[in-house]
Amino acid sequence: MNNNYTTIIGLEIHVELKTLSKMFCACKNDPFFAGKPNIYTCPVCLGLPGALPVPNRKAIDWTIKLGLALGCEIPLVSKFDRKHYFYPDLPKGYQVSQYDMPFCKNGFLEVENTRDQPSYNRMVRIRRVHLEEDTGKLLHAVIEGKKRTLVDFNRSGVPLVEIVTEPDIRSGSEATAFLKKIHRIIRYLCISDADMEKGSMRIEPSISMCRKSDATSKSRPGLDYMIPAYRVEIKNINSFRFVRKAIDYEIKRQRELLYRGETPEQETRGWNEGKGITVSQRSKEEAADYRYFPEPDIPPLRWQQSTIKTIQSTIPELPDAKKKRFMETYDLSDYDAEILVETSQLADYFEECTRAAQKLMPDTGNQDIKQYQEINPKSLANWIINRKINFEEILPARLVTQIVQTKKTSSIDKGELEKIVAQVLVANSKAVEDYKKGKEQALMFLVGQGMRTSKGKISPESLKKLIADSIIRRKEQE
Ligand SMILES: [Zn+2]
């Protein structure tokens, strides 16, 4: 009985671009670190009469860059439109957005091995990627005993990209996998921090269900479902985990209604994390309610193919391509490559380490040659992943020498190691006493002595641990 329905999920993803200035004025774009409300404002982003918008070229280029990275077509003409609605965080009474001529359309992103169906790849089509302006922010407070709503316009007019998918997603886990991929691409493109906690990336899933029998008997060719008569949109989700929980909850709620013979209402709901449920917020507006019309203060934008090519050339190697290359070039497993390409910084670090290992390789005859020869991309990847190396703390060349040191230490047999440590402790009893009294420098002194006694065969890191452990053990025996 549970399999009678197919879940239909589409996503709207809003991403704030990290341009220096806002979308249509020269105000600073830094809403999270402003410190004070309403300091980054001007007549344009406050919506004062007569103020004229000037589009931010960088924001437009970045939107097209994102569209290209998602396999979109870039129409040679597009325009901005006014989307009207009344809300206190929207000073003009309309939002400058894009309606029927977005910058990018008809893209796709493939999601691999979704957890519900291993080894199944889902192609999610991207309907459009367009650019608009963010709204101000409302703050609810009690002032002099009265409930007040305050408004901060620092965020008003910040460039906001909206990515809209086709309803091609079939489960909460697929949605999460898709979002994580989009998130990683945005970070690779360096166009946004896409920080969900701060709200610079916001997700609105739309969920509905339809009968599978409908899907097979009445569907249009190429469509595996019938378009349901309703759609539930969930707002205010600020983590990947909550997206999944909200979708799973909604699937359960809608399925129960459908089994009772009811049709879920078309509405907007909110996710209540405390209770783990979605709650009804309002019935859904139709597009016509927004009374879209072309923004008269900004002429349509026309593109040369060459400009689009130039933007294309600024796209770096993206995570999927990088992962494939890592697996082929360095013989890494799917799992290791996936972890290393999580951020472009980590991926770059790994490659710098492989180069450092090559560069530091000593001449034949050198006593360390064996340890260096054992370092290959695979072992470097393991080292970085298993020891959770923080690439901001240790330079690639330093990491390579550290690995060589550790290999040398582990090549010394245990008896010899203990002998060296014992020798150092006996010869430096004053430093041992100092360390017992809590003087940390005394330990570094002992490590130095150990380095000398072992003729550099043991790494300082291992010595530090061995000596400290040994002193503690002796102390316990006293
Ligand atoms: Zn402004």
Image: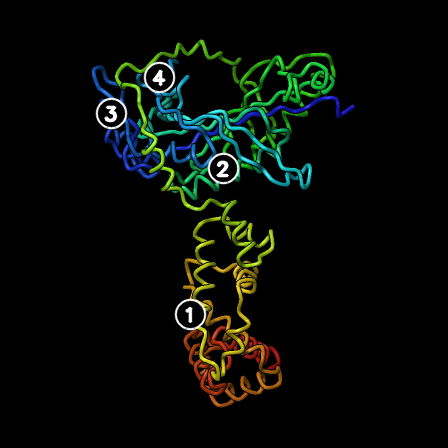
User: For mark 4, what is the residue?
Assistant: 81
User: On residue 54, which mark appears?
Assistant: 3
Split into quadrants, the picture shows ligand 1 in the one at top left
- Of badges 1 and 3, nearer the viewer stands 1
Dot 2: within a 10 Å radius of its alpha carbon, few (fewer than 14), some, or many (20 or more) residues?
Answer: some
Of labels 2 and 1, earlier in sequence is 2
The earlier-in-sequence mark between 3 and 4 is 3
What amino acid type should be assigned to the residue bearing mark 1? Lys
Residue tagged 2: 182
Q: Picture coordinates of residue 197 (x, y %)?
A: 46, 37
Element at label 4: strand
Indicate the secondary structure of the residue bearing disc 2: helix
Pick the front one: 423 or 185: 185
Q: Gap in Å between the C-alphas at discs 3 and 4?
A: 14 Å
Q: Which amino acid does label 2 sit on?
A: Ile
Q: How far apart are marks 3 and 2 (CA)?
A: 29 Å
Q: Position of residue 300 (x, y in %)?
A: 30, 19
CB of mark 3 near ligand 1 (< 8 Å) = no
Observer able to see residue 425: yes
Bin the neighbour count of mark 1 within 10 Å (Cα to Cα): few under 14, some 14-19, many 20 and up.
Answer: few
Q: Quadrant of the C terminus?
A: bottom right
Which of pointers 1 and 3 lies earlier in the amino acid sequence? 3
Q: Do the residues labelled 4 and 1 touch (CB within 8 Å)?
A: no
- CA gap, disc 1 and disc 3: 51 Å
Q: Kindly report the distance in space between the C-alpha atoms of the residues bearing marks 2 and 4.
A: 26 Å
Asked if one can make out residue 141 in the rendered structure from this viewpoint, the answer is no
* Residue 249: percent from left, percent from top: 64, 27
Residue at the image position 38 percent from the left and 42 percent from the top = 190
Q: Quadrant of residue 296?
A: top left
The residue identified by callout 1 is: 359
Residue type at tag 3: Val
